[in-house]
């Protein structure tokens, strides 16, 4: 096994002597790449974002922005990273760097004042700049002028997409406290398409670095990645105390904010057995280590309830690393994916060194951050049965529209035939020690006409589901009230679309 190394801005460097828990952020700053900043140390501000070469959806490689404050540098062993400094080009030795088109637009349109957040914005913006399927509104059939000015995004595209096809959700994980977002939006909506000679654009046509086996050790602590699932499961049998990570969007917060350290961290994010997505005749199987962004782009709206979840799940920066396996594995009662997956009647494929078993998600959680998963067992995949219910919705009640933790999350999946509710599945988050199914409300709906009277009566039942508590996000009374309101909202949103 070769020494752990990482390529940064085209130059290879050893990861040693960094400790196994050292983040990409600290690694880069210790090497003088101080454009990468620490703002929050928990993946909420985006000041630390960098680009990583990852397997692409439309091309062999995508340039994917991630939070460098959360990812252990050992997790990028053998991988390729570009920072804000690496975006600019030097045409000749001794000459000033030539700004990248994204940097140029940020500069000329006043997108930076103090500059602390600017490198992070630039990296997130560059990830969207290089997105292969980004296209101007006119080319995408929106009837807008591809050459429209930067300030015309709402008219030429829509409120969240520029005339150049730029998706503002790409910047949802980046915060600025002094510039204001209008000039940043102007810069985003002004960027064109990459030039043919752009080296990072050309790089997309080549395969990303292959995952490498890693066994990085220092002071009796280790960061380990095996080549196959079988090898990983054997390791977990030997080390049941190991911390399993994929995108590190949860574990990275524990390391930074709570100073947690693990004797052994095992990475599963690049295991091919956990990165498959298959649509079969009776189910969809989603690999537990696929990122939410990868799932979103590969499903491309074919599961409407998941498509509604994704934009509300944290930020694009987090979704570029977060996985369904990780969100379910933490057992959090306020994770956003469990209510949706409960409504979809998902099952989990659990694997250990002895084999696999399939567990309905409704039977998976046993208590606060506890589950039926045994020591040494991994979530290999999530299975969604087909066909899907046609009436679905995901309602997330939080203090901010995006990039916030839910106070209450409710997911609905209903079959309504001939004006009657034939089947109802409702998943709830934030109202009990675990994510739960609203079984009493489902029973109050099934077999009854989909009318205002039925919805009102069922809403009263839904208000009593779970055991909501009062905390700094919401009171128990507010949570109960929002449960009932969510069903009334569903009825109002869907009655015109449901055949009578």
Image: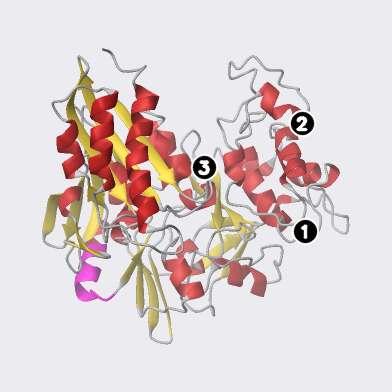
Residue visible at 24% across and 69% down in the picture:
236
Main SS, magenta residues = helix
Instruction: Please give the residue where the numbered disc 3 appears in the rendered image.
Output: 61
Circle 2 residues within 10 Å: few <14, some 14–19, many ≥20: some
- Whether residue 380 is visible, yes or no, is yes
- Whether residue 388 is visible, yes or no, is no
Residue 377 placement (x, y as % from top left): 20, 63
* Figure label count: 3
Q: Marks 2 and 3, Cα distance to the nearest angstrom?
A: 31 Å
The magenta segment = 232-241
Magenta run includes residue 235: yes
* Above or below, comparing residue 496 to residue 95 in the picture: above
Q: What secondary structure is marked by label 2?
A: helix
Q: Is residue 180 left or right of residue 311?
A: right
Circle 1 residues within 10 Å: few <14, some 14–19, many ≥20: some
Which of the marked residues, 1 or 2, is nearer the chain's N terminus?
Answer: 1
Magenta run includes residue 157: no
């Amino acid at each position: 096994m070769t020494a752990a190394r990482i390529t940064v801005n085209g130059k290879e460097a050893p990861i040693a002597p960094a400790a196994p828990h050292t983040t990409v952020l600290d690694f880069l700053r210790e090497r003088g790449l101080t454009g990468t900043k620490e703002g929050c140390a928990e993946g909420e501000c985006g000041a630390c974002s960098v680009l990583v070469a990852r397997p692409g959806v439309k091309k062999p490689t995508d340039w994917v922005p991630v939070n460098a404050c959360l990812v252990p540098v050992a997790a990028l062993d053998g991988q390729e990273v570009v920072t804000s400094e690496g975006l600019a080009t030097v045409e000749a030795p001794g000459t000033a760097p030539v700004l990248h088109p994204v940097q140029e637009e940020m500069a000329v349109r006043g997108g930076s004042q103090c500059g602390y957040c600017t490198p992070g914005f630039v990296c997130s913006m560059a990830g969207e700049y290089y997105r292969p399927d980004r296209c101007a509104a006119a080319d995408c059939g929106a009837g807008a002028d591809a050459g429209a000015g930067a300030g015309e995004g709402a008219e030429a595209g829509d409120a969240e997409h520029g005339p150049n096809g730029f998706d503002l959700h790409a910047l949802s994980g980046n915060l600025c406290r002094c510039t204001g977002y209008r000039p940043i939006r102007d810069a985003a909506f002004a960027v064109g398409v990459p030039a043919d000679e752009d080296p990072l654009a050309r790089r997309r046509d080549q395969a990303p670095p292959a995952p490498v086996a890693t066994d990085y050790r220092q002071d009796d602590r280790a960061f380990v990645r095996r080549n196959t699932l079988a090898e990983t499961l054997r390791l977990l049998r030997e080390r049941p105390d190991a911390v399993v990570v994929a995108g590190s969007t949860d574990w990275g917060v524990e390391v930074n904010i709570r100073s947690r350290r693990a004797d052994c961290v095992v990475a599963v994010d690049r295991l091919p057995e956990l990165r498959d997505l298959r649509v079969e005749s009776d189910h969809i199987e989603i690999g537990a280590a696929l990122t939410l962004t990868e799932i979103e782009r590969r499903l491309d709206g074919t599961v409407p309830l998941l498509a509604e979840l994704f934009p509300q799940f944290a930020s694009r920066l987090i979704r570029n690393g977060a996985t369904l396996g990780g969100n379910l594995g933490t057992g959090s009662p306020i994770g956003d994916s469990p209510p949706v997956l409960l409504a979809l009647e998902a099952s989990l494929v659990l694997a250990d060194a002895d084999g696999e078993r399939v567990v309905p998600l409704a039977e998976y959680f046993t208590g606060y951050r506890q589950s039926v998963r045994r020591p040494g067992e991994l979530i290999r995949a999530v299975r969604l049965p087909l066909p899907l219910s046609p009436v679905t919705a995901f309602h997330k009640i939080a203090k901010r529209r995006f990039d916030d933790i839910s106070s209450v999350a409710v997911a609905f999946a209903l079959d309504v035939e001939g004006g009657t509710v034939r089947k109802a599945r409702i998943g709830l988050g934030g109202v009990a020690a675990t994510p739960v199914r609203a079984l009493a409300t489902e029973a109050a709906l099934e077999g009854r006409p989909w009318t205002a009277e039925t919805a009102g009566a069922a809403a009263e039942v839904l208000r009593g589901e779970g055991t909501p508590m009062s905390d700094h996000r919401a009171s128990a009374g507010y949570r109960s009230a929002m449960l009932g309101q969510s069903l009334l909202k569903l009825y109002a949103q869907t009655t015109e679309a449901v055949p009578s």
